[in-house]
Image (cartoon, rainbow, N blue to C red):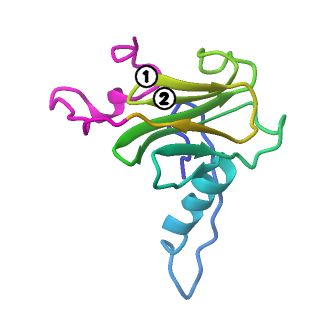
Amino acid sequence: MKADGCGSVLTWMIMPDKDRGKDYNHSGFIDLIISGLIGLRPRSDGVLEIHPLLPEGVWDHFCLDLVLYHDHWLTILYDRRGTYYGKGAGLRVFDQGFEIAIHQDLSPFEVKLKEVAVFQRSPDLPLNAILHHNYTGAQP
């Protein structure tokens, strides 16, 4: 399973359960990664809460890309040294390709999300180019 779409490969070994089949962990496992390890906590009040469970110094970088969250296409990336993704050190949040938050470490924080119109993708633009970290067309 490729858990990050921003360039590095993170492989998780999941043992199939003989009684439930090979797809049993499909939704539940990735939810633990997104809401637990990376720390994207669901809320209904227009606030994005990030509360990573990773201790400082364990991973040098991670990226959670193309997450649809209340009509916002989010990218959450962390780069301890700022050299892997080339966006600078720390934890960064992008909304539809625009940087909306920078946090220097992995401590919990919140970001107020602006109301946005639902993003309408041009049929000529590949989906993976909309928010991919190497795509610079949507950057200010």
Residue 78 falls left or right of residue 119? right
State the residue in front, 12 or 61. Answer: 61
Q: Residue at 48% x, 29% y: name it.
A: 94
The circle on residue 76 is none
State the count of labels.
2
**Mark 1 highlights which residue?**
98
Main SS category, magenta section: loop
Q: Position of residue 112 (x, y in %)?
A: 51, 36
124 drawn magenta: yes
**Mark 2 highlights which residue?**
94
Query: Marks 2 and 1, Cα distance to the nearest angstrom?
Result: 5 Å
99 w.r.t. 9: above or below = above
Q: Residue at 42% x, 28% y: name it.
A: 132
* Residue furthest top as drawn: 140
Question: Which image quadrant is residue 30 in?
Answer: bottom right
Residue stretch in magenta: 115-140
Q: Position of residue 11 (x, y in %)?
A: 63, 49
Three-letter residue code for mark 1: Phe
Q: Residue at 65% x, 20% y: name it.
A: 84
103 drawn magenta: no
115 w.r.t. 92: above or below = below
Question: Which image quadrant is residue 78 in?
Answer: top right
Residue 83 falls left or right of residue 118? right
* Residue furthest front as drawn: 45
Q: Position of residue 93 (x, y in %)?
A: 54, 31
Three-letter residue code for mark 2: Phe
Q: Quadrant of the C terminus?
A: top left
State the residue in front, 85 or 14. Answer: 85
